[in-house]
Amino acid sequence: MSSFSVTEPSRRAKWFAGTLVILYALITMVPLAWIMLTGFKSPSDAISYPPKVFFEPTLEGYVNLFTTRTRQTPEFLAANPPENWYEEIVREYDMVIVGPSKFGERFLNSVIIGFGSTFLSIFLGTLSAYAFSRFKIPLADDLLFFILSTRMMPPIAVAIPIFLMYRQLGLSDTHLGMILLYTGVNISLAVWLLKGFIDEIPLEYEEAALIDGYTRFQAFYKVVLPQAATGIASTAIFCLIFAWNEYAFAVLLTSGTAQTAPPFIPTIIGVGGLDWPAVAAGATIFLLPVMIFTILLRKHLLRGITFGAVRK
Amino acid sequence: MAPIIIKNIRQDFGDFNAVKESSFTIEDGEFFMLLGPSGCGKTTTLRMIAGLELPTSGEIFLDGEEISQKPPSQRDIAFVFQMFALYPHMNVRKNLSYPLVSQGMQRAQVKAKVDEVAQILGIHDILNRPVGGLSGGDRQRVALGRAIVRDPKAFMMDEPLGALDAEFREHMAEELRALHDRMNATTVYVTHDQLEAMQMGDKIVVMNNAVVEQFGTPQEIYDKPATMFVADFIGSPSMNFLRFEGAVPEGARSVDLNGHMLGIPRQMQGASGSLVFGVRPEHVTLNDSGTYRGEVLATEYLGTTQIITLATPNGELKARIDSAQVARVGETVGLGFNADAITLFDESNGGALRSELNDEVLAHG
Ligand SMILES: Nc1ncnc2c1ncn2[C@@H]1O[C@H](COP(=O)(O)OP(=O)(O)OP(=O)(O)O)[C@@H](O)[C@H]1O
Ligand SMILES: [Mg+2]
């Protein structure tokens, strides 16, 4: 018996959709996989032609990424045998490790600035979205439009004024400066997305909590927040991805203390010739936090992204 | 448990006046109905009592204390929402515990209290289920449980049966009334269903267009309506209105309808102009000796009784008579009216004229 259903796709449609998704995944995954593999190659394997898919893996790239090294005389090398596995790796090039590289620091900066600005965007975004959603605010529509309008031009268009402003205010190359900047860019997205989510939460839940003896603020964080979790999670991911990957402002406004990973990674290339495995190792590690964050929140994310599309 | 006294409360939403100065009293332990058509301000009134809306003016006394401007958390009033509003991220037990936790009650005590309430409502076997998958009836019970668990001074219920299907409504209505009788809790119940109000309520407030039309027991409201709106809204079929021009002096015991003298309760208020002779269908009889006559337009058989629709010189009239009586469509029959049950209205303002029948009710309503 054959049947036709509006909601259930046919077998052929499923196959077709499945194939498309796999193809798309392959296309997008290849560069990623390539970067990850390159991180484990030796410099010669990394640039060999035709490219090698099978090779002997080495941690050289990672060691080079995290250390600074210097070439030494054969006498010195003979007198000081390597003490551990990473010293051994660099000895192959007649080098010794003289200290850690800046990568760790820069990576930590990225974490502080990325997560800091995400937290601040979500914190401020949730409060203002709640206010816009629940209270009668004079000129609410105009305010919301103004907030949105801050995203209507590419942020980099105001790079020069921001650069001058930051220099005057002493915010150049500071964590606080970068956190504020990324929060400023993300906040409009956060307010708009979160307002949509909070609008969908029926008012009765809060009223029930008020009746049950809670204050307005308790009702907000005990009843509204848990229900906005989906929206908060997906908004947080969008904010983090922007702040984490941002390159242009980072190049312009940071150079030392507060420099994030994106402007730092390319500088590795200049250190000791074209050290592709080290660059690839840096890129791989750089990808991890957003990946882990997304995986941790993926349950919420999937629902969050389809939420607005399905209802209303 | 406590009495609630409402004095001249008014609610404005911007320019819109949702409730005009309204007053009524809810006695301790009463099952009190707020009845009226959609949009008349029932929910707004209920929300003002609970504190979800602060009145623009007026006073609300709960247990002698003026509470109209207090936040809901300080009123100790429970509220059952129309769509139940169970916390979706908590299971049944957590939902029931929530009002107790807010009071800082000990965990063991909370558990004991929740178990007791679950037993009363017959929901102990679903205590650990998430609220998402519950049937309508169980949601309703959980919502009631959350209201009764902390022994509040009074309950507010906004069309609590509105979300249930018709068959289950009746069952739940009985359960609700039984629960009330067992706990004797002051309850204010909003409905737009006059049958529900008549069946369940100790007292009824009938609202229309933001004003209280009448306030009294179901019987008073049915037998002695204060306005044409109440007379029309309550009862099915509703009260017949025979319109006539004329005058009724104070003390009159009869009224002239197209030259036929019809008996009425002794009038305590005179009036003239456009008047209305109001009679419920069950107070109309088919009576061959009656000089006031009407033509049968239709009959509707209802088992023990039947509803006869007649055309009279003063408009259409419905009579509820014994099924055994024969009435043929097209026939012209004589009509009799139970003189003691007649209410006259002044059509210009829709109000009932005071008479021996309704004087006492109109005086306080
Ligand atoms: N917050 C508000 N702002 C503006 N108008 C409101 C607000 N709440 C209610 N109203 C209006 O006040 C009037 C009375 O509303 P209310 O909800 O009290 O009616 P109701 O008698 O409960 O009706 P229903 O049977 O439809 O629930 C309606 O016209 C409604 O549109
Ligand atoms: Mg309502």
Image (cartoon, rainbow, N blue to C red):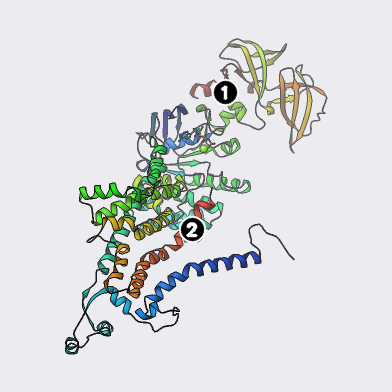
Vertical placement of residue B272 versus A264, above or below: above
Image point (35%, 67%), residue name: A286
Q: Quadrant of residue B285?
A: top right
Residue under the point 23% across and 56% down = A174
- Image marks 1 and 2: residues in contact by CB distance under 8 Å: no
Q: Position of residue B333 (x, y in %)?
A: 79, 22
Q: Is mark 2 within 8 Å of ligand 1?
A: no
The disc numbered 2 marks a residue on which chain?
A
Residue B282 position, x and y percent, is 69, 29
Depth check, front residue: B206 or B15: B15
The answer to which image quadrant residue B257 occupies is top right
Q: Quadrant of the N terminus of chain A?
A: bottom right
Estimate the x, y position of residue B305 in percent, counting from the top left.
73, 34
Q: Is residue A149 above or below residue A51?
A: above
Q: Residues within 10 Å of mark 1 (few under 14, many from 20)?
A: many
Left or right: A120 in relation to B170: left
Residue topped by disc 1 = B227
- Can residue A75 be seen here? The reply is yes
Asked if badges 1 and 2 are on one and the same chain, I answer no
Image side of residue A140 versus residue B131, left or right:
left
Q: Give the residue furthest to the bottom.
A: A78
Q: Tell me which corner region of the image, top left, top right, bottom left or bottom right, holds residue B334.
A: top right
Q: Which chain letter goes with mark 1?
A: B
Q: Nearer the viewer, mark 1 or mark 2?
A: 2
Mark 2 — residue?
Answer: A303
Q: Is residue A122 left or right of residue B204?
A: left
State the SS at label 1: loop
Name which residue type carries label 2.
Answer: Arg
Pointer 2: residues within 10 angstroms few (<14), some, or many (20+)? some
Inspect the image, locate mark 1, and give the three-letter code of the amino acid beneath it: Thr
- The CA distance from mark 1 to mark 2 is 54 Å
